Every structure is written in structure tokens, then in C-alpha cells.
Amino acid sequence: MQKLLASWESLCMSSGLLRFADINLRGIGQVMLQDNPLTGLLFLVAIGWGSYTAGVPHVALAGLLAVVVATLTAYWLHLDQASLNAGLYGYNGVLVGLALATFLAPGPLLWAYVVLGAAVSVVAMCGIATALKPWGVSALTFPFVVVTWLLLLATYGFSGLTATSLPTGSVVAPFQPYQASPLHLIDLTGGVLQSISQVFLKASGVAALILLIGLAVNSLAAAAFALAGAIIAVATAHLFGAESDLITGGLLGFSPVLTAITLGTVFYRPSGRVAVYTAVGTVFTVIAQSALNVALMPFAIPALTAPFVLVTWLFFLPRNWVESSSSTISDAVDASSP
Amino acid sequence: MQKLLASWESLCMSSGLLRFADINLRGIGQVMLQDNPLTGLLFLVAIGWGSYTAGVPHVALAGLLAVVVATLTAYWLHLDQASLNAGLYGYNGVLVGLALATFLAPGPLLWAYVVLGAAVSVVAMCGIATALKPWGVSALTFPFVVVTWLLLLATYGFSGLTATSLPTGSVVAPFQPYQASPLHLIDLTGGVLQSISQVFLKASGVAALILLIGLAVNSLAAAAFALAGAIIAVATAHLFGAESDLITGGLLGFSPVLTAITLGTVFYRPSGRVAVYTAVGTVFTVIAQSALNVALMPFAIPALTAPFVLVTWLFFLPRNWVESSSSTISDAVDASSP
Amino acid sequence: MQKLLASWESLCMSSGLLRFADINLRGIGQVMLQDNPLTGLLFLVAIGWGSYTAGVPHVALAGLLAVVVATLTAYWLHLDQASLNAGLYGYNGVLVGLALATFLAPGPLLWAYVVLGAAVSVVAMCGIATALKPWGVSALTFPFVVVTWLLLLATYGFSGLTATSLPTGSVVAPFQPYQASPLHLIDLTGGVLQSISQVFLKASGVAALILLIGLAVNSLAAAAFALAGAIIAVATAHLFGAESDLITGGLLGFSPVLTAITLGTVFYRPSGRVAVYTAVGTVFTVIAQSALNVALMPFAIPALTAPFVLVTWLFFLPRNWVESSSSTISDAVDASSP
């Protein structure tokens, strides 16, 4: 594996075009925080498979176009070379492209929207990363969330763009307890896999397996945390009595999967405490996902990965405390006496 | 008083269990910003009284369980010892426990929810305090607000947890002017007292009196500001023509009470200007409370103490200017030329 | 021009009253970021004309009262003298006064509201500017937006204040494509002009021309960017199929106008790249305006200039990258690896 990547790297050195391809692939890999072109390639295959089998091949195309536009925008703005090379200006673009093509009807204005959204996602990435710098916290997929929310909301005021599969706006109503339908193990397995593929807005078990392979070629730990996160999410949602369709469709699990990967692999010194801490964060991401699904109902827009971003920021900020073995580090909460 | 506290402190020194009790009591006291175990004990009595007379003793139990879970979580995460000892990791937990048990129906999942919420409130406290550190601003009750909002919103997607007393979701509608019903002085007095007890989500005049005593044993100024804040809040709400039931139930006054205590006792050099400044902040908290009540209507969740947090942060940030006698301090607004 | 201003300045030196007038006029000028008393005077004429011809002279009066109250508040709080003299504590006040009088019915409580709102806008300005200092980003009109939103929302809970022209609260519904009505060039011209006058909440071509003159006397570039921003906004909104009435009434253009002025004139080294960057920001402000119009529908409050603030902050944060010719500046996105 290392040898393969090394020879690919030397090929990229000699060809501007290959380097460009390399950066875009890494951009796709960074959606799940992997800086590896092979991972990105496998993710792209999963996206393509999921789109093709769902009968919407143009969705994969929009994702691909968006990552290319994002990379070109980053070049044009002369952004930081190291971040650019690691694909950090591309992953929000991929997601913007996939989301817009998933939720809006095809047409020329959709493609204009994809190009605009991808370009602005780079500005948003750079702006938000700059804003978060004082805390050493990364932007995660927040640029994707903000830009996509604005673009989707705006379509309700534009006759040129129509939503095909956005939720219908309605005021929050108490949950109607459904007929008890004990989920079968097979459904739960489907829910676990689709929780993983829904990170790329796809409901496909095959795509999920390709994604897991893509994670594993770069980091076995990342693949393990993704799988564990999906299992925890499905179990939690089931315990609290969430709607079966949401669970088995993976729609309550994609944010927790990202939380598990991010919190699980970001700490320098793994420990039992870190594992439990990550698990609690993953459980709370399910709560946040359900909450934001409800909160966004009046606006008829999806929560996207906002629950992941919110909970991961919250759990990441106290990382120095959680990692240390004693409570003698910097007095982080000094100023917190109310 | 000082002697009593000193001998209690020496008892705590010698017993881990008493120290643990001490920390939890201080946590309850910190809901109104008092670092004093006796104050905490009196507050606990007020909570118990308010819950018992309202026929919901399990609410007080949930508050108690939550503060214990919060303290244990802080221990487990090895958080800052000084903050822990001052009860700063406990007050959000108490409020989370009280709020969840007040708004949701009893049942095993409620208790799971209380434990989860209390534990996450500590992470949120540590995370938000870290995030706010650059400004020297404290987290106030924002961790409580965020965690409780998410937990309550999520229940609309869970059949396992049902809301018993949450507002019904509806879109904002123009206020229907009610029949003129001049409030009697006795009603207003009730409103003032219940504004104080509603800080702990209780509508009880007796509880309010115990709370005032609890404040007074630690700080006469805090008790005075709490009372003055409640009076200003009731008068302001009445002047603008707010609904009588909201006023007399203390539901427009608990946030202003907290604003008055916080702004009133936080400045180092009291002065007429500081008093007027605090009064304006208290009046504006009534506006913010009414505004957030309206804004959260579509989501069918209560505003909790968010108005207090928002207005206090806003009024606290320019504190250096307000306190100084001349305008020659650091050029705080230098960068503000648009 | 320079000579005129110089002799005015020497007059102000000798008279406290003239200095006070000077500060208030600059405050009005700062609504469009111009630190020039003559510009402010012309803006005031435009406000007066727009209010008078619309049959609501008290709106202009409320704006004037509010700027005076804001300036007095800044004096009273001993805020930074340089910022005060440049009118930076006044522009949010003007806008608060204009907005409250535009959206609420006249009456004694309206005037109390204007005074309270203007005073709190100064606290908010100082607080938000302090909060944003670490990023070298200015508060823009965010203090106006926050304070006005809260004051307007609160009226739905107050029988003493009634909204005359606020949108009716309703849940987001898919946009109903209207009959194709190709806008005529004359309508578009009206839309461009009213996009400029709507910065002061006025729909008046004459007022727009006076405002352009006011900009030009202080900065030709500012006038050019305002006009270009308005044209871009109208064209973008038309392309995406926004409602004709919103376009020709300037209601999708006032935020983009402010974005264009701010981004266009803030960069030290103008270049083709900066111009394109500003244009993209202006286009995206139209998206954000449409999005926030939709998002605020359930709350029945207007978006005000929030889209301008949001997009300008986002596009302003990466300014160092955009201006530099190479990508070797400080590693601003270092910490952004997710």
C-alpha cells in the first residue's frame, strides 16, 4: 500500500494533471477525514454506484463537478498550498454538489447553482477555518452545511429552481407513537450500513461496504470507529423509539458516524476514557440529529451534518482535560466563574 | 455565619463524603451564582418545597440526581479542581434535571435522559467556557439551555419520551389584545415572587422567600438585586401590555432576575451609572424573553434562561468602558470601523 | 470639498453643539460606511424625502431621535472618543429608529421603544465589536439587526405595541411559479434605484439619487460599487426567477448593495481578482437574502440587513489570502485539517 502510494506520489510530481487529480481525490476522501487518494477513489466509486443504482447518475456528476470547481477556486484565491494539497478545500464542495443535485430538480440553473455553491464553499471553508483558529478547532463540514442551507432555502423564493425531495414545511407536532413494529436484526443491519453510506447522501449497502474498504486502506481505526458509530446510532435511536424508516434508512446515523470517526481518531493517546467519551458523544449526536430534524421542519430543509458539527465541536473543545491523566493542566475554566 | 462555614469547611477536609456533598450543594447555589453550601442547601429546600406542593416530588429528585451525575462526570473527566470545588460543573446539571422532569412524562427513559443530559451538560460547560475564554465572559446557563433544547426537541421524534407540558407548536400570530384587566397590587406581588422561584422552574411564593434567604446568607447585594430585578421585570411587562398570566406566573421575570444579579454584582466599582446600566439590561431582558417566547413557538420548546444569557453577554462585554471614569482605556472598538 | 469640510471642522472645534451635530451626521453617513458629515446630511435629506412622500414623516423623525439618543448613550458610557467622533455608535441607532417606526403603529410606546432600542444598540455595538476584535472584523449592522429583531418579535407578546406592516407568520411553502412576466428595462431601473434607497427602508428613486450623490461626495468608488451592487442584485434575482415585486421594490437588493460597498472598498490593493471576488459575494448575498426571507417567515419578522452581515463576514475573513499574490502568507488554515 505504502509503495503504491509512493509511486503515485512520484507520478504526481512529474505531471500537473495527475497532481490535480490527486488533490480532487483527496478532497473526496476528506469527507470522512482521510487524506489518501486511493480512499478518495474508492469513495468516488461508492458515490457512482449509489447514484447509478438509485437512477440518478447526474448526482454523482454534480459531486465530481463541484469538487473540481472547489479546487480551481482554491487555486485562484492562492489559498494555503499544504491545505490545498491535502484536499481540505474540496470536501465541502463534493457534499454541496451531491446535496444540491439530490434535493433539487435537474436543469441548467441547477448546474449554475452547483458551480456557485462549490466556489462559495471554498470561501466559507477559509473564512470559518480562520474564525475557529483561536480554539484549534477545525471547520469540519460546517461550510457545506451553511452554504447548502442558504442555497436550498433560497429556492423557495425562486421559480427557476424547484425542490424535488425536500421535506414539506410544517410546524412541530407531538410525535404520533406508531404501531409497535419490533425491528428485525436484518433491518438493523441495513440501518447500520446505510448510516455509513448516507454520509454521501446515498442509501446503499454496497456503497457502504466500498466506503468501509476505502476507510480501511488508509486507517483501520477509522473504519472501526465508523462501524461502531453506526451500530451505536442505530441502537440508540431504536431504544428511544425513533421512527423505523428513519433508522433503517440510515437517516439518524450518518452524523453519529462522522462524530465517532472524528472524536475517536483525533485524540493522541487512546484510552478507555476516550472510548467512553467518544461513545457518549456519538449517542448525543443521535439526540442532536433528532432535535435538528424537528427544529428544521418549519423551514423544510434537511439537517445535513449539522448535528455532527455541533456535537463534535462541543466534545472537542475540552480535549485537553479529557486526555490528561491529572487535573493540573492549564486552568482552562478559570474564567468560567459565573 | 463565617464561623459556621469555617467549621463546615474543616469537616469537609476530613471526609470525602462531606466534600462531595459540599460540592453538590455549591452546584445548586451556583444556579444563582452563589458559591456557598448553605445557600445551596436552602435552594434545595426551596426546590423540594416547590415540587412537593405542586404534586411533582420526582422533579426535585431529578434535579438532585442530575447534580450528582454532573459532579461525578466532572471528577471522571479530571476537570479543573478549583472550578469543581466551587460547584461550577453542577449548576447546569441541576437545571437540566429540573427542566426535563418538569416538561416530560415520568418513566424509565426520563431517568436515562436525566443522566445523559446531566453528563453532557458538564462537557458543554467545559467546552463553552473554553470557547468564551478569550473574552473573559462566563458560560452562564448557556450549557443548560443548549443541552435541554436539544433533548426536548428530540422527543418529538421519539415515541419513548412524551412531553407533558411543552407549549404546542404554532406559527407566530399577532397578539390578540385581551380585555383590559388592571392587575391588582396583590397579583403583582405574586408575580415578583414567582419571578424569583421560576429560576428553578417553580411557581411558589414560599419557595421564592426561601431562595431570597438563601441569597441573603451569602450576599445581601445579590438578594437585593434579585428582588429589584423581579420588580423591574413585572413593571416593564405590565407597561408593555404582556399577558397577565405570564406576568403573575413569573414567566417573564426569571431571566431578568438572573440578569440583575449577574450584572449588578459583577462590577468591581458600584456606581449610579452601573445601577442604571443594570436596570436597562434588566428591562431589555424582558423584551428578549418575550421575543424568544415568540420565536420558539414554532418549535414548541420553552425559552428557558436563554434571554438572560444573551442579554448578559451583550451587556457584559463592554464592561471596561462602563466601569471606567474616562474614555482612555484600551482602544476596544478600534477594529470596529466598518 | 476638502476646504468646505476643513472649515466645518474648525467650526466644530469651537462649538460643542456643532460637534454634536457633526457626530450625529457622521452616524447617519456610517450606515453606508461614510465618515463624512456632508454625506450624512444628504442621507438625512434622502430619508426625509422618502418618508415625506410616503406619507410617514414620523419615520424620519424616529430615525433622527434614535441617532441622537445613541450618541448621548455613547457619551454617557464614556465609550471610545475616536469611534464616537467617527459616528460609529450612531449608525445602528438610525436604522433601529427607522425600522421600528416603519413596522410598528405610532403611539407613545413606540417612542419609548425607539429610545430603548437606540440606547441598547450602542451597548450591542460596543459588545459585538469587542467580541469580533480577535478577527479584525467589524460589527457592520449586526447590532441593528439583533436589537430590532428582538424588539419586533417581542411585540407579538405585547398588547401595547402593534405591528402595522410586518409579514404574516406562516410556514415555508414551495414557491408558486408566477405567470411569466418579463420585467421591462424600466422596471429593472426602478429596482436598481430602490435597492439603494431600501438600505434606509425607503422605496424612492429620488431618495436613491440623493443617496448616490451623498456617497459620491465622500467616495466615488463607494458610489460606483453601490450602483454596480444594485445592478448585479437585480440581474441575479431576475435570473433565478424571484418574484417581480420583490425585485422592483428593491427588497432583494439593499443587502447586496451594502456587501458591494463594504467588500469593494475595504481591500487595500484593488485588482481584477478582488473585483470578481466582490461580485461573487454580491451574488451570494442575493441568495442569502432570499434564504433569510424564507427562514424568517414563521417568525413574521423581516430579514433586515442580516444577509449582508453574514456574507460580508464570511467573505471578509479570508481577505489576507485574496489580496496576496502568492500563497506564502501566514498559514491561516493550518488548524483546519478536520
Image: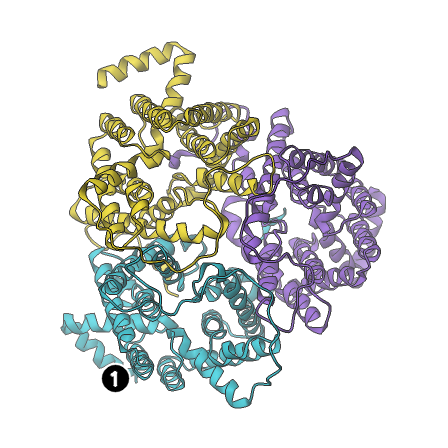
Chain colours: A yellow, B cyan, C purple
Q: Quadrant of the N terminus of chain C?
A: top right
Q: Circle 1 marks a residue in which chain?
A: B
- Callout count: 1
Left or right, residue B136 beside residue B273? left
Q: Position of residue C38 (x, y in %)?
A: 81, 49
Residue A135 image point, x, y percent: 39, 45
Snapshot quadrant of residue A157: top right
Q: Is residue C151 left or right of residue C86?
A: left
Q: Residue C285: horizontal and vertical position, in percent? A: 60, 40
Residue C249: % across, % down: 73, 45
- Disc 1 crowd, CA 10 A, few/some/many (<14, 14-19, 20+): few
Please tell me which residue lies in front, B265 or A240.
A240
Relative to residue A246, is residue B195 depicted above or below? below
Q: Which quadrant would the C terminus of chain C be assigned to in this image? A: top left
Q: Give the residue pinned by disc 1.
A: B4
In the rendered image, the vertical position of residue B136 relative to residue A82, given as above or below: below
Residue A157 visible in the displayed image = yes
Depth check: give the residue in front, A172 or B223: A172
Q: Is residue B331 visible?
A: no
Q: As drawn, which residue projects farthest toward the front?
A: A179
Which one is nearer the viewer's eye here, B168 or A65?
A: B168
The three-letter amino acid code for the residue at tag 1 is Leu
**Which of these two is toward me, A66 or A270?**
A66
Element type at mark 1: helix
Q: Quadrant of residue B54?
A: bottom left
